[in-house]
Image (tube, rainbow, N blue to C red):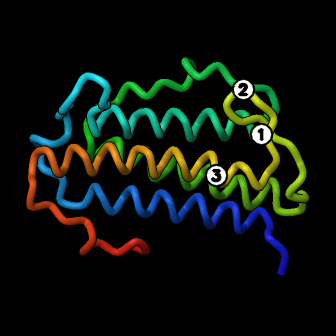
Amino acid sequence: MPYCASDVAAAVRASRRRLSSHLVDLGPEQQDCRPCAACMSIGESLAHLVSDDRAALEAMTTGPEPDYAAFDEPERDTDALRANLETSHDQLGDAIERDLAASPMEVEISAHASPVKLDAVAVIRCSEDYYLAGQVAFIRLATDPAWNNSKASCDG
């Protein structure tokens, strides 16, 4: 079977599951930690992803690049952000499968101020998740050197 929109959605969902595995048993001291000025806190990272999911959904459904500031997520409570993130990500994945299911991989949609082909959406969305998973891992290790995410399942 050829690569299709449901494969794009599956890749995007897999990268978010990997990020989520880094958030298991997160301590309160880790949520707002910023080990260096260039690093977002975990709460800031989650809020960024909620905003990014919402903006990506808007761009995908309306065509033009959205005003990203309109999607800023004010919430900073990590538990609430995780719930918001699950909702925003489910909506995005569902829209990819539903709205683009019949689209060829060559169809162009708006992503980060540029039209990109549908197959590139997986790369763009996944890279964001993996980048921020790295930030979360950096914070986890900086605050708990014994933390070992290799025990967490990539599928869980």
Label 2, label 1: how far apart the Cα atoms are: 14 Å
Q: Label 2, secondary structure: give it.
A: loop
Q: Can you say whether 110 is above or below 7 in the image? A: above
The residue lying at 28 percent from left, 55 percent from top is: 23
Q: What residue is shown with label 3? A: 123
How crowded is the residue under tag 2: few (<14 C-alpha within 10 Å), some, or many (20+)?
few
Q: What residue is shown with label 1? A: 61
Residue 114 falls in image quadrant: top right
Q: What residue is shown with label 2? A: 113
Q: Where does the image place residue 105, in percent across and percent down from the top left? A: 85, 57
Q: Is residue 149 left or right of residue 13?
A: left
Label 2, label 3: how far apart the Cα atoms are: 15 Å
Label 3, label 1: how far apart the Cα atoms are: 19 Å
Please state which of residues 56 and 141 is positioned toward the viewer in this rendering: 141
Please state which of residues 75 and 106 is positioned toward the viewer in this rendering: 106
Q: Is residue 7 left or right of residue 133?
A: right
Label 2 or label 1, whichever comes before in sequence order: 1
